[in-house]
Image: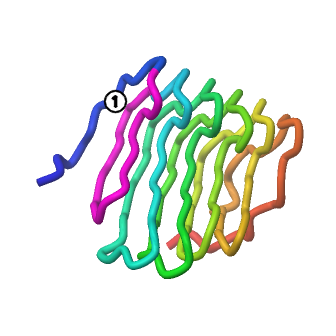
């Protein structure tokens, strides 16, 4: 059973919060800094069940690869991440928010994405959507502006 809130204070490790199995997880008030990836999920061909992750009131900054990174291959189950009130700053190669591959979706609201190599990295069918109330600028490349979706 996954607890309703994972308190992460991962510093100088490979990953702050990483998942590669069917799961539902919430990261609330976490610092995932100075890692390879702050928060991430990886799928693979033939995986089932999918992943639903919520990152709220957290800091995913100063990671050498990315702040929040989703990667999936064709045929992988859906990976969905809700990002709310998160600072994704000063991350490396893959930037602040990365959705790479089919069935990867990041929805982001009330968050700051700044000082990264790339603000939003959307590749190979990945999707990033915004609630329109984020600050995504001041990155080496801000990346594509995520389409705005309505608050409900």
**The residue tagged with tag 1: helix, strand or loop?**
loop
When the figure is inspected, residue 97 is found, relative to residue 114, above or below; the finding is below
Q: Is residue 107 above or below residue 28?
A: below
- The quadrant holding residue 125 is bottom right
Give residue 140's position: percent from left, percent from top. 88, 36
Q: Work out which residue is located at the far right of the displayed protein and give it.
A: 140
Bounds of the magenta span? 13-31
Total marks placed: 1
Q: Is residue 130 left or right of residue 16?
A: right
- The residue beneath circle 1 is 8
Could you tell whether 12 is left or right of 89 in the image? left
Bin the neighbour count of mark 1 within 10 Å (Cα to Cα): few under 14, some 14-19, many 20 and up.
Answer: some
Q: Is residue 80 left or right of residue 25?
A: right
Q: Quadrant of residue 34?
A: top right
Percent position of residue 104, x then y: 55, 68
Residue at 84% of width from left, 47% of height from top?
142
Residue occupying the point 32% across, 77% down: 48
State the quadrant of the N terminus.
bottom left
Q: Is residue 99 magenta?
A: no
User: With 64 as the anchor, is 59 left or right in this view?
Assistant: left
């Amino acid at each position: 059973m996954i607890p309703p809130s994972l308190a992460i204070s991962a510093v100088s490790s490979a990953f702050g919060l990483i998942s590669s199995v069917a799961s539902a997880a919430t990261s609330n008030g976490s610092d995932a800094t100075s890692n390879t990836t702050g928060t991430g999920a990886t799928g693979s061909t033939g995986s089932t069940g999918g992943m639903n992750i919520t990152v709220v009131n957290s800091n995913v900054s100063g990671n050498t690869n990315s702040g929040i990174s989703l990667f999936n291959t064709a045929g992988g189950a859906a990976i969905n991440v809700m990002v709310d009130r998160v600072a994704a700053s000063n991350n490396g190669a893959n930037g602040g928010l990365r959705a790479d591959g089919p069935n990867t979706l990041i929805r982001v609201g009330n968050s700051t994405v700044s000082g990264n190599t790339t603000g939003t990295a959307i590749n190979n069918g990945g999707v990033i959507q915004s609630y329109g109330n984020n600050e995504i600028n001041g990155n080496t490349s801000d990346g594509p502006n995520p389409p705005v979706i309505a608050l409900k």
